[in-house]
Amino acid sequence: MGLSVLGRRHTILSLTESQAPVNRLPFICLASALATLFAVPSGAQAQRRAPAELRWELIGHTPLDFDSPLQYPVLIAGSPDLAFAFDMAGNEIRAVRSDGEIAWTRGGRGGGPQEFSHVTDVEFINGRLWVADRGNARSTGLDPDGNWGPLFTSPDVYQIGAFSDGRLLTLGVLPEVRLYSESGVVLDQLRLPARYQAMNPMAADPIVSSASPAGGVFLVFRYQPNPILISAVGSELAMKELVGPVARPFQEAIHSSRGGRQIIRTPEIEYHRSVSVGSDFFYVLSVLDDESLIVDRYTFAGEYHDSFVPPEPVGAWTVMGEDLFAGLIYEPIPHIKFWRIVR
């Protein structure tokens, strides 16, 4: 399946002279504020989106009936053999095989050591499933067979990631990044630049990925176009601001027309929906302003590589292994589907 979104019909906005505002100062001020908020990092340059031609094969899915054990999945993470979904209906983690069968279920609503309260993230990292439980202010680990592992307090935890050496990284809502040892000791913390802290709560909703083999953790804010790559040098955190792709440079396609002018726009990213990491790339699932979906791939150095359209409209997306993916779909009922890229 090709990158059909790039060939979609353009949106055309017509502005006649009679509709043009007399006082342009408020619009100039607004444009200046947005330029500051979404500024491209110094020395970086946005790239045009490059399509990747992919063919998909559906290999399995959970039951498509109303007595399915998967009732209200909202988060998903992937391992080479299983997809892990957090089901809000019972505050449970369900491990699902690629044929759609449920392998095991853990958790339940509560504050006990094997219960969850308000889960905000699940990530499969270094052979272990980590659950960010903000309601209980802790991070909990399970192995792929569902055996309970480490549990430690992490105040204000919202998203969770990890480095390849086992150290964990959590994000709070502020946003503040904390680095933990495997035993749960805080090693370092990092406050992001002021422009991220100044965002409204919707824009400051972070989506963090687990670490790449190269040691970087990929961080995306839901309504901020440019990602961040966080690394740990010794016990200290460092960050690098990256540049996301654009469909076409701003105002490249402005054409004069009779009685006014036409601004032709190609679809741009409206917001990011999920991030996952594979053996070679970070994958960022985003919603475009025409409501279509796009997945952008970044190298582990943080450079944009290419983009593709997922095989179906998915609410969340995760990489399981080489050319194997899983996605949450909510129509006609909530379920998980599994696809393989056909080479």
Image: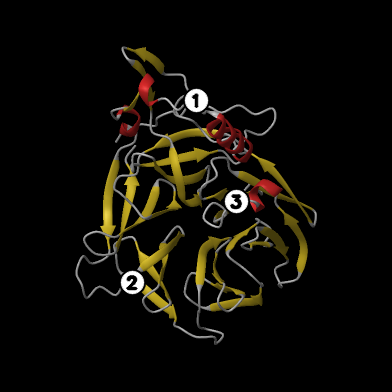
Q: Is residue 37 left or right of residue 108?
A: right
Q: Which residue is mark 2?
A: 102
Q: Which residue is mark 1?
A: 250
Q: Position of residue 202 (x, y in %)?
A: 51, 55
Q: Nearer the viewer, residue 318 or 219?
A: 219
Q: Position of residue 288 (x, y in %)?
A: 39, 40
Q: Position of residue 2 (x, y in %)?
A: 31, 32
Q: Is residue 52 left or right of residue 120?
A: left
Mark 2 or mark 3: which comes first in sequence? 2
Mark 3 or mark 1: which comes first in sequence? 3
- Label 1 sits on a secondary structure element that is loop
Residue at 52% across, 83% down? 114
Q: Position of residue 179 (x, y in %)?
A: 72, 61
Q: Which residue is mark 3?
A: 199
Real-space Cα separation, disc 2 to disc 3, in angstroms = 40 Å
Q: In the rendered view of the protein, which quadrant contains the N terminus?
A: top left
Q: Quadrant of residue 134?
A: bottom right
Real-space Cα separation, disc 2 to disc 1, in angstroms = 47 Å
Neighbourhood count class around disc 3 (C-alpha, 10 Å): few under 14, some 14–19, many 20 upward: some
Q: Nearer the viewer, residue 31 or 156?
A: 31
